[in-house]
Image (cartoon, rainbow, N blue to C red):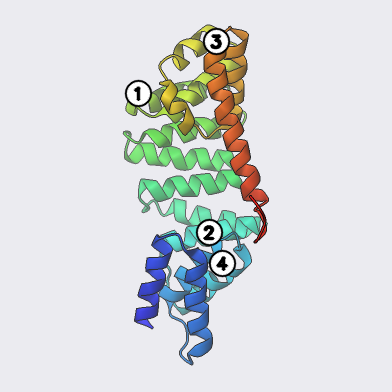
Amino acid sequence: MNQILTQAWTAFRAGSLREVVRLLETNRSDSEEPQSIDTLVLLGRAYHDLGRPFEAADALERASLIGPISDEARIVLASSYAELRRTDLARELYLQLALSRRLPAELMLQVAAGLSAIDAPELAMKVCEWITEKDDSIAKAYYDMGVYSALSGNALYLTEALTRRAIQLDDANVHYRVGLVSLLIQLDRKDEALEAFSTVDESRVHTIECVTCLQRIESLLRECGQSDSADICQDRIDRLQADKARHEHPASPGAIE
């Protein structure tokens, strides 16, 4: 079994999620031995990343019945509950993880994102506050806190302050700067928005992931006569929307591309 698990981990790291499931489920049917915690956790993670939360939750719950599972696995279980709309279970598990205050910042940020995804942005904001109390140098904690603050209905000046703090800590992060530009447009501070966007190298526009931000910026650039820059933003918007369409409606096997 150890050899199968090693092969499955190799496949998982390579992104071959269906191969992970094939290896572990085939071994399950061929073997009389019960599946181990490690096997079930990996199976659950693979199912989760494949967009199959029911199977993911089942595998991770079976693992937790055998013994304690890792914090990473518990986050995946909470995410699976959220996708299955078992919101109370997801919230309870996320809060258990956050309140322990033992998680590294990277995992705490995942917990915060999970809480926001189940419509609990105030709790997500509090988790980010705990991160910054422990380490005030983590830019993403400030940026995400600003996002959750806005979702909580707080005044946008607080989001602006938190976003600027994130940029101060990580000036090279184009996503934080684009978030600030988008926010300034929302606040109708167009001149400041244009100035902030002027610091974004055009070659990095293709790395921006927020379609809504790009649409706001494209509209402002078009309005201000900066058509070349607007066209670059529109091209990125088109690519992101095309990628989303392919993901949601993949071509059937044998379809002509």
Q: Which residue is mark 2?
A: 49
Picture coordinates of residue 67, whole percent (x, y) = 43, 76
Eye-nearest disc, 2 or 3:
3
Q: Is residue 119 visible?
A: no
SS for tag 2?
Answer: helix
Q: Earlier in the sequence, mark 3 or mark 1?
A: 1
Q: Which residue is mark 4?
A: 56
Q: Which mark is residue 226?
A: 3
Eye-nearest disc, 3 or 4:
3
Q: Which residue is mark 1?
A: 168
Cα gap from disc 3 to disc 1, whole angstroms: 27 Å
Above or below 30: residue 245: above
SS for tag 1?
Answer: helix
Picture coordinates of residue 66, whole percent (x, y) = 46, 79
Q: Residue at x 61, y 21 (%)?
A: 216
Residue type highlighted by circle 3? Gln
Cα gap from disc 1 to disc 2, whole angstroms: 34 Å
Eye-nearest disc, 2 or 4:
2
Q: Residue at x 45, y 69 (%)?
A: 42
Cα gap from disc 2 to disc 3, whole angstroms: 41 Å
Picture coordinates of residue 252, whole percent (x, y) = 67, 58
Picture coordinates of residue 49, whole percent (x, y) = 53, 59
Q: Earlier in the sequence, mark 1 or mark 2?
A: 2
Residue type highlighted by circle 4? Ala
